[in-house]
Amino acid sequence: MPTSMRTDDPLWPRAGAWIRPLSDGEHEGDFALLGVPAHAHSISPSSADTTPAAVREALFGYSLYSASSDVDLTRVRAVDLGDVSGPDEAGGEERIVSAARDAAARFPLVVALGGDNSITCPLMRGCMDALPGEWGLITIDAHYDVRDGNTNGSPVRRLIEEAGLPGPHVVQIGIGDFSNSPAHALRAHEHGMTVFTRSSLRDSDLAEVATEALRIAGHGGRQVYVDIDVDVCDRAAAPACPSAAPGGLSAHELRYLAGLLSADQRVRAVDITEVDAAADAPDGRTVRLAALIVLEIAAGVALRAPGWRPPEIT
């Protein structure tokens, strides 16, 4: 929302003003927002590097109150870590790893704003470095992301092959028809991944799907990383996602899943990727959806066990 169009109402605080910059040496906060404006490794031409700033601006169009869950986000302390510099330049991937490592060691939850889906691998690597132990991955995505190479189509394969992520603790929700290949489906099967196709979700209870995904990814007390690729949505809801197709998840379904998963204390990081703010509809619906996903994640954090804090890093 342009600054000139905003009205101030002390009884209607804006979400954009609630996420505050981090002060030097500060460690307090329930979740930290981190921008990762990467786009050069996208298979489809993309200006996803414009998205973190656009989402931050879009947050000013929303309040901090969730009527459905009666959650007031003023009780959640949110800090903004700014953007990783030059994520597509030489050494950029290691800067992403370093930023994620630092954030995950200091805050109970890291929320990363992409950027294309190539950021998922270095972000999760950084979290794994900061928080040793076993990990699982949940993706909400129309694609398996097991392509060869180093692109926005390869993060799941890279995490399995390069970071040792166990395939049986990877759950993929929303895999689309006519968006993948038999070879990639076979790779997912051979790695032991659990797949919920878009078609299967039409007859499923999403709360039960989220519970099962967390059971598999977080089995044995594993920490969980959640990758939200917004191109899982129906193209009408997400025109700024280059690979979004008609028939994907509704905006409501994606928001609901984001909140359900984030309410589980095993979830330590979430990324929001594949939105190209420069390609959005005139009403900014995709960027607005991404901003609402941030708020749904925060509402999930507010619903976590009272007084829960992550274990101290030693």
Image (spheres, rainbow, N blue to C red):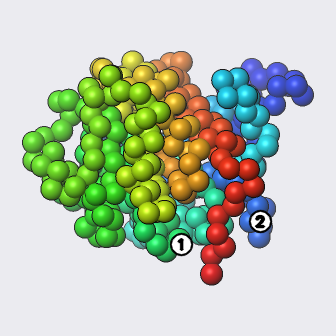
Residue 72: image tag: none
Residue 130: image tag: 1
Q: Secondary structure at mark 2?
A: loop
Q: Where is mark 2, residue-wise?
A: 26
Question: Can residue 38 be seen?
Answer: no
User: Is 268 left, or right, of 59 in this rendering?
Assistant: left
Quarter the C terminus occupies: bottom right
Q: Quadrant of residue 67?
A: top right
Determine the residue located farthest toward the left in the rendered image.
182
Q: Quadrant of residue 12?
A: top right
Quarter the N terminus occupies: top right
Residue displayed at 53% across by 18% down? 283
Q: Position of residue 102 (x, y in %)?
A: 59, 69
Using the image, determine if residue 314 lies above or below residue 174. below
Q: Secondary structure at mark 1?
A: helix
Q: Amino acid at mark 1?
A: Ala
**1 or 2: mark nearer the eye:** 1
User: Is 114 left, or right, of 15 in this rendering?
Assistant: left
The reply to whether dot 1 and dot 2 touch (C-beta < 8 Å) is no
Q: Position of residue 74 (x, y in %)?
A: 79, 40
Using the image, determine if residue 199 lies above or below residue 295. above
Crowding near pointer 1: few (<14 within 10 Å), some, many (20+)?
some
Tell which of 137 and 57 is nearer to you.
137
Using the image, determine if residue 252 lies above or below residue 82. above
Q: Position of residue 300 (x, y in %)?
A: 62, 41
Residue displayed at 34% across by 57% down? 169
Q: CA distance from mark 1 to mark 2?
A: 18 Å
Question: Can residue 6 be seen?
Answer: yes
Q: Position of residue 304 (x, y in %)?
A: 65, 47
Residue displayed at 26% across by 52% down? 193
Residue displayed at 27% across by 34% down? 197
